[in-house]
Image (tube, rainbow, N blue to C red):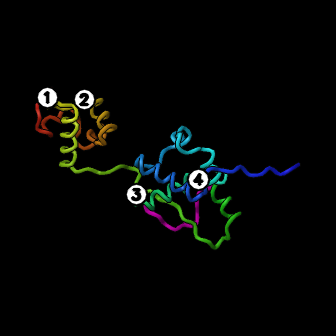
Amino acid sequence: MAKQKPKAWLHTPDELLELAVQKCIEVGKVPNRRSWTHDNFLKFEEIVAVLGKGDWNRALAKITLAYNQRSGAGVVQEVTATTESAKGEMLQNEPETSPRMVVKAVSNRGKKYTSEELKAQMVRVQEFFGISGVPTQVQINEAARKIATPCYATFLRNFGSKSGWALVLGVREN
C-alpha cells in the first residue's frame, strides 16, 4: 500500500495560530467548536490538522493558550498532569521531564459587580430602550447581547426579586 502525501494547507502553523488568535480577539473570547466549523475565514479541517495534528482538543488548547497569553484573560500555570486524551499523546511525543503548560481559568463565573456598577448598567439598558422604568427580562437580556451589559440573572442575584427593583434603582414602575 502506497503512502499518501500529506495535504498542503494554505497556512503555516504560526500563521494559522495568529489568524485564530485574531479571530478570538475579534469575537472577544475563544469561540466554540460550532463557530469554528461555520467560519468562512478559516477552515476547520486545517485548524485540526495543522494546529491539533488531527485532534480538535489539542488545537483548541493551543488557540486558547495563545489567546490568553495575548489578552491576559487567564492564568497560565505549569503543571505535570493534563487531560487524559492529551496526556497519552504528550507522553508519546515528549520526554517525561519536559514541563507541560495548560491554561487554568481564573473563575467559572463572570465579572462581579458592585451595586453602583449594576445601577449604572441598568441606566444603560434604560437608555438603550428609551424607557424610564424597570426593563423587562427580555429587554435586559437583549441589551446584554447587543451592548454588553450584565444579563437578567446577574441583576436578579444582586438586586433580589424584581418587584423591589424600582426601589433599589429609584425609578417609577411602568
Mark 1, secondary structure of its residue: loop
- Do the CB atoms of the residues marked 3 and 1 lie less than 8 Å apart? no
Amino acid bearing label 3: Ala
Q: Where in the figure is residue 143, as x and y percent of width and height?
A: 29, 36
Looking at marks 1 and 2 on the same chain, the residue that comes earlier in the sequence is marked by 2
- Do the CB atoms of the residues marked 4 and 1 lie less than 8 Å apart? no
Q: Where in the figure is residue 146, as x and y percent of width and height?
A: 32, 37
Rounded to the nearest angstrom, the CA distance separating label 3 from label 1 is 39 Å
Q: Where in the figure is residue 98, as x and y percent of width and height?
A: 62, 71
Mark 3, secondary structure of its residue: loop
Q: Quadrant of the C terminus?
A: top left
Q: Which residue is mark 3?
A: 73
Q: Which residue is mark 1?
A: 173
The relative height of residue 79 versus residue 158 in the rendered view (above or below) is below
In front here: 162 or 104? 104
Looking at marks 3 and 4 on the same chain, the residue that comes earlier in the sequence is marked by 4
Mark 4, secondary structure of its residue: helix
Rounded to the nearest angstrom, the CA distance separating label 3 from label 4 is 18 Å
Amino acid bearing label 2: Thr
Q: Is residue 105 left or right of residue 41?
A: left
The relative height of residue 78 versus residue 171 in the rendered view (above or below) is below
- Do the CB atoms of the residues marked 3 and 2 lie less than 8 Å apart? no
Looking at marks 4 and 1 on the same chain, the residue that comes earlier in the sequence is marked by 4
Amino acid bearing label 1: Glu
Magenta-highlighted residues: 74-84
Rounded to the nearest angstrom, the CA distance separating label 3 from label 2 is 32 Å
